[in-house]
């Protein structure tokens, strides 16, 4: 018998968004290297299969998601979109699994699905297949979700009117206060709490894998294990274990040449991930503040990230000219390479979980400007627990931007943060080496499968 036929198959189901697809494909690559065949089940848009970087993987499309074009996400917002996606995909996904079992025999060792794709649980149960949940966000976020799933929106709104309750520290989650629970910017509260309940209550999986590291989130991991009552494996940061190119946008590598010409640790790298949008007014204030800081800057302005604009056409000519004197703009950068470049001294970030891990792995301190949901939790950890960044709050205005850049790149305080970031970097690298906590967690998962 050929070796390929002996391999056990793992079915991966990512959320069709950059911040979720990337770690899922890294996990798939890591498991593929351990000898598993990989099948990726995707929706109709943001398809990884189109990147052609995973020649050995099988890709299957859920046909029903045709009725859910990408514009639905923009129209409905993330919470309603996830409800729709789960409703639309449940039966269709069962058909996909039925087909796979018919065509390939019973070789499926496990279905690993993103925690937000909870429709997968029903198929796993129907076909009696083991399933594991994969979380691409922090353990702290998952614990907060468990808390939110037990709350009612009305009670929360009443609670938030009481300053004393707002400041109450969350049990085993210090320094998180009640008011820090990730509730903002994702739509109506009652629907968010309902989604949290769906995710928590529909769990049929036998384990949870998280792209995090024990040394970063040990108390949250302990509390999560207690809440869920199933094994929780922290095996991040996955991007150190494997390199798996899954960028959905084309990377502009010309910025690396530009970085090569800058002084060590002088550049601020600015990127707000794949979802966040800013108003033109805020972008103009950012531009002026960055220019006034006198530091060189590399700025990712993703197409569509300025509200109402295709790209940067809403910015006046003189501002673009000013920006190009000291800065470099790209539509999409090779972020991990940029953060590892010796010229980069700091990262202005929206604090998505991937960006947070990528920055820590390179020992780069951060200016935190979270927008919604769990980004605020990540910013809080960066500022108050790991102390390798600080938050810029309130309205964006040029003076604040200039001060923040100087604080991070020029001041003593920034140097201290960088030192702490370098210590964390070493700890994270040690966790994925032979015998490290994430290395061991991956071995345990492979044995579990
Ligand atoms: C989303 C959510 O917004 C985030 O809060 C959550 O933690 C994950 O899902 P996103 O906003 O895209 O993700 O942020 P983030 O998690 O930081 O992921 C962005 C990814 O895009 C990173 O892996 C980063 O390396 C990559 N990226 C970003 C690039 O490759 N090039 C860029 O120019 C910008």
Image (tube, rainbow, N blue to C red):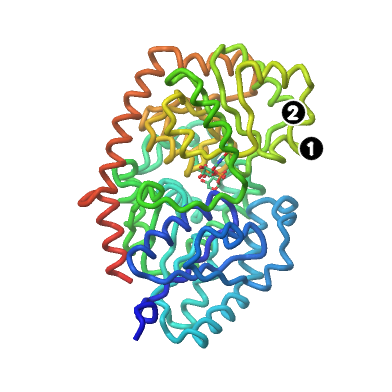
Depth check: 348 or 81 in front?
A: 348
Q: In the displayed orientation, state which residue is furthest to the left.
A: 435
Q: Position of residue 242 (x, y in %)?
A: 38, 52
Q: Secondary structure at mark 2?
A: helix
Q: Vertically, is 361 above or below 151?
A: above
Q: Which residue is mark 2?
A: 280
Front position in the image: 342 or 204: 342
Judge the density around disc 1: few (<14), some (14-19), many (≥20) Cα neighbours within 10 Å: few
Residue 308 bears which disc, if any? 1
| Picture quadrant of residue 45 | bottom right
Mark 2 closeness class: few <14, some 14–19, many ≥20 residues within 10 Å:
some
Task: Determine whether the residue tagged by mark 1 lies in a helix, strand or loop.
Answer: loop
Q: Residue at x 56, y 60 (%)?
A: 52
1 and 2 marks in contact (CB < 8 Å): yes
- Please state, as top left, top right, bottom left or bottom right, where the N terminus lies in the image: bottom left
Residue at 58 percent across and 72 percent down: it is: 60
Q: Vertically, is 98 above or below 416?
A: below
Left or right placement of residue 284 versus residue 241 in this view: right
Q: Quadrant of ligand 1?
A: top right
Q: Indicate which disc, 1 or 2, sits on the residue closer to the N terminus.
A: 2
Residue 2: image x %, image y %?
36, 82
């Amino acid at each position: 018998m050929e070796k390929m036929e002996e391999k056990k198959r793992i079915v991966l189901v990512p959320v069709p968004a950059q911040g979720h697809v990337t770690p899922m494909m890294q996990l798939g690559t890591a498991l593929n290297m351990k000898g598993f065949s990989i099948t990726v089940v995707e929706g109709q848009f943001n398809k990884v299969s189109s990147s052609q970087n995973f020649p050995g993987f099988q890709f299957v499309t859920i046909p029903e998601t045709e009725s859910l074009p990408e514009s639905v996400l923009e129209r409905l917002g993330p919470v309603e979109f996830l409800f729709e996606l789960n409703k639309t995909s449940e039966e269709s996904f069962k058909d996909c699994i039925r087909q796979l079992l018919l065509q390939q025999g019973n070789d499926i060792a496990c279905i690993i699905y993103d925690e937000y794709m909870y429709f997968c649980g029903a198929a796993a149960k129907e076909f009696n297949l083991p399933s594991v949940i994969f979380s691409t966000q922090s353990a702290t976020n998952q614990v907060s979700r468990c808390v939110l799933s037990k709350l009612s929106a009305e009670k929360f709104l009443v609670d938030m009117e009481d300053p004393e309750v707002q400041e109450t520290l969350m049990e085993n989650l210090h320094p998180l206060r009640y008011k820090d629970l990730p509730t903002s910017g994702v739509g109506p509260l009652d629907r968010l709490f309902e989604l949290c309940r769906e995710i928590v209550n529909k769990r049929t999986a036998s384990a949870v894998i998280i792209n995090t590291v024990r040394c970063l989130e040990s108390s949250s991991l302990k509390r999560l294990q207690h809440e869920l009552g199933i094994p929780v494996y922290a095996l991040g940061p996955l991007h150190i274990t494997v390199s798996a190119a899954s960028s959905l946008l084309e990377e502009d590598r010309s910025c690396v040449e530009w970085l090569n010409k800058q002084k060590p640790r002088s550049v601020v790298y600015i990127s707000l991930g794949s979802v966040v949008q800013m108003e033109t007014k805020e972008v103009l204030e950012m531009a002026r503040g960055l220019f006034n800081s006198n530091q060189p800057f590399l700025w990712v302005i993703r197409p569509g990230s300025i509200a109402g604009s295709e790209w940067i056409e809403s910015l006046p000519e003189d501002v673009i000219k000013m920006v190009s004197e000291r800065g470099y703009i790209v539509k999409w950068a090779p972020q991990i390479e940029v953060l590892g470049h010796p010229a980069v001294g700091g990262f202005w970030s929206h604090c998505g979980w991937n960006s947070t891990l990528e920055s820590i792995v390179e020992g780069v301190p951060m200016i935190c400007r979270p927008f919604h949901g769990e980004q605020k939790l990540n910013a809080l950890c960066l500022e108050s627990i790991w102390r390798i960044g600080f938050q810029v709050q309130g309205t964006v205005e040029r003076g604040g931007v200039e001060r923040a850049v100087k604080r991070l790149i020029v001041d003593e305080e920034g140097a201290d943060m960088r030192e702490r970031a370098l210590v964390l970097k070493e700890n994270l690298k040690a966790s994925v080496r032979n015998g490290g906590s994430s290395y061991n967690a991956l071995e345990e998962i492979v044995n579990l499968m």
